[in-house]
Amino acid sequence: MGLAEPMKPSEVRTLVLAGHTLLRGILDDIMRVALAELDQPGTGAARMRQRAIELADAFSAHLEVEEEILRPLLQKIDAWGPVRVERMNADHANQRERLFEIRRQCGDPVFSDAQLARRLKQLVIDLREDMEWEEREMLDADLLRDDILSIRQFGG
């Protein structure tokens, strides 16, 4: 049996961006429930904890997809590829650590709903910023082109 044909850069871009769209929906919902919990304590704590665990699972799965299909492409796409991969690795390690901590806090009755809501609010802000940076610096259509020549390889 032969190996499947590798994905084109544009296909990788489309798949990763679709993942970002799904994650933004989860992030929006978590922000709503976290803000509601801060505004009216106890009204949505169970939903907030449930959605936080769902976020941790979905975001972790997305990181694995990026590492499988985007990392190898970035590594060789241009002279800055190794720098982009290094940044991706560092960002993903930080995100995994924070998601693990959120999961732990969701199951810890000592950790108050208000504390969790504040942490989730900040996590949502940070993850959105990370995705926006990634879309600008790693998923730009001029970078992930299907043709061989990349516009960004030249200084002008």
Image: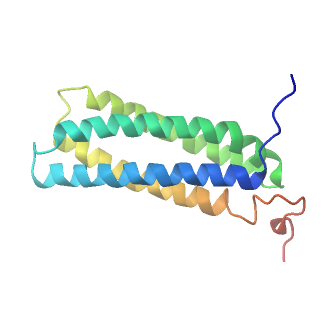
Using the image as rendered, state which of residue 31 and residue 83 is in the foreground.
Answer: 31
For residue 140, which quarter of the picture? Answer: bottom right
User: In the orientation shown, which residue stands out farthest toward the front?
Assistant: 1
Image quadrant in which the N terminus is located? top right
What residue appears at the point 31 percent right and 40 percent down from the top-left corner?
Answer: 51
Image side of residue 15 versus residue 22, left or right: right
- All told, the count of numbered labels is 0
What residue appears at the point 13 percent right and 55 percent down from the top-left corner?
Answer: 39
Image side of residue 25 versus residue 13, left or right: left
Q: Position of residue 145 (x, y in %)?
A: 79, 60
Using the image as rendered, state which of residue 28 and residue 76 is in the foreground.
Answer: 28
What residue appears at the point 53 percent right and 60 percent down from the top-left corner?
Answer: 132
Image side of residue 100 versus residue 47, left or right: right
Colouring mode (rainbow / by chain / secondary structure / one colour): rainbow
Q: Position of residue 105 (x, y in %)?
A: 28, 31
Q: Position of residue 94 (x, y in %)?
A: 50, 40
Image quadrant in which the C terminus is located? bottom right
For residue 17, which quarter of the picture? Answer: bottom right
What residue appears at the point 78 percent right and 55 percent down from the top-left corner?
Answer: 80
User: In the orientation shown, which residue stands out farthest toward the bottom?
Assistant: 156
Using the image as rendered, state which of residue 32 and residue 74 is in the foreground.
Answer: 32
Seen in the picture, residue 128 relative to 155 is either above or below; the reply is above
